[in-house]
Image (tube, rainbow, N blue to C red):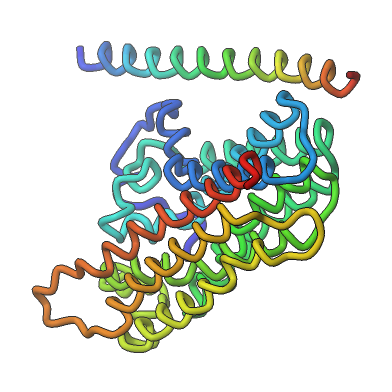
Amino acid sequence: MTMTSPTPAAAAASPPLPADWRDLIALTKPRVMSLVIFTGLCGLLAAPVGIHPVLGFTAILCIAMGAGGAAALNQWWEVDIDAGMKRTSQRPLPQGRLDRTTARDFAGVLCAASVFLMGVAISWLAAAILAISIVYYAVVYTIWLKPRTPQNIVIGGGAGAFPPLIGWVAATGHITAMPVVLFAIIFIWTPPHFWALALFVKTEYAKVGIPMMPVVAGERSTRRQILAYAVLLLPLSALPWWLPGNEHAGAIYGVSALVLSSVFLAFAMRVGLRERSGPDDTMKPEKQLFAYSVLYLFALFAALVVDRFIAL
Amino acid sequence: MTETPDRKTIDQIRRSRNRVLALSLAAFVILIFFVSIAKMS
C-alpha cells in the first residue's frame, strides 16, 4: 500500500477542485453509518435507565461522527484498493474529486471531535470505548488485519460491534452483561454477513490482493464457516432473554430472536450446503443472505427496544 | 475563456461548503448550549 502515490484518476484531475461537502459526506459511508446509528440508539434505549433526550441525541451524534471519521480514515488509507474494485471505484477519492490530505484532515477532526464531545457531554468511559472502536476499525482492521489475514473480518468485525455497547454505557455509565452480549451478537453476525458479500465479489477482492476468506480458503470452506457462524448466532441472539438480573430482555425479544435467527440459519444453509454451479451462477442465495443479514440486525435490535417499552 | 466556468464552479463549491461548515458550527454551539442546560438539570 502506497501512502503518497495518487491514483491515475486523481492525478488526471488537475488542477484539483475544492472538496464538495457532498463528497465529504460520502466519505463517511452514510449507508453503513445508518446501521451503526441504529444499533447504538437501540443500545441506548434498551438500557434500564433513561437518559435526557438532549444527552441521548448527543451520544448518538458522537457515535455517528466517530463511525463517519473511522470510515473516512478507511477510505483515505485504501484509496488504491478502492480504485481497483468496481464496487468502490466511484468513491470520491479514487475518482479524484477529493484530495487525500483533505480526506485525512476531515477524518481526523471528526474522530477527535466525537471522542471529545462524548467525554465532555456524556461520560469519559463512553468516550474511551468510542476511541477504542475508531482505532480498532481504522488501525487494527483497515491497516493491520485486512491486507494480512483471511480472518480479517472475524477479528475486525469487533469494530462494528461497539455501537450498542457505547449507547448502553452512555445511558448507564457502566458495562454489564447485556451490552457485552449485544457486542457478541454483532461480532458473530459480521462474518456470515460479510462473507456472503465476499462470495459474490470474490474476483474483485482477488484482483486487489485482499485475502478475503473465499479468495484464500476457497468457496467451500467459506460456505461451511458461514453456516457455522449462523448456527452459533441462534442461541447467542436469544441469550439476552435468559440473562439474570433485571436487565434481561422479555418474551417479545426472545421469540423475535429465535424466529429471525432461524430464518437467518435457513438462508445460511442454502449458501452453506451448495456449490457455485459455474461461471454463469447468479449467486442469488448469497445475495439473499447478504440482504437478509442487514434486515436481520435491524429487526433484532428493534425487537430489543420494543420489548423494553412494551413489557408483557 | 475556459477559465471562467472553472472559476465559477470553484467559487460555487467553495461557497456551498462554507455554508455547510457555518451551519454545522452554529448547530454545534446550539448543541453545547442545550447539553449544558441538560447537565445542570
Q: x, y (%) of residue B32?
A: 76, 19
Q: x, y (%) of residue A1?
A: 47, 66
Q: Nearer the viewer, residue A207 or A254?
A: A254
Q: x, y (%) of residue A230?
A: 45, 75
A76 horizontally vs A195: left or right = right
**Residue B17 visible at all:** yes
- In the image, what residue occupies the spot 51% across and 72% down? A234
Query: Which picture quadrant has residue A60?
Result: top right
Which residue is the extreme one toward the right?
Answer: B40
In this rendering, is residue A56 above or below A85? above
**Residue A104 visible at all:** no
- In the image, what residue occupies the spot 65% across and 62% down? A241
Q: Nearer the viewer, residue A116 or A175?
A: A175
Which residue is the extreme one toward the front?
Answer: A312
A120 horizontally vs A71: left or right = right
Q: x, y (%) of residue A134?
A: 65, 52
A65 horizontally vs A169: left or right = left
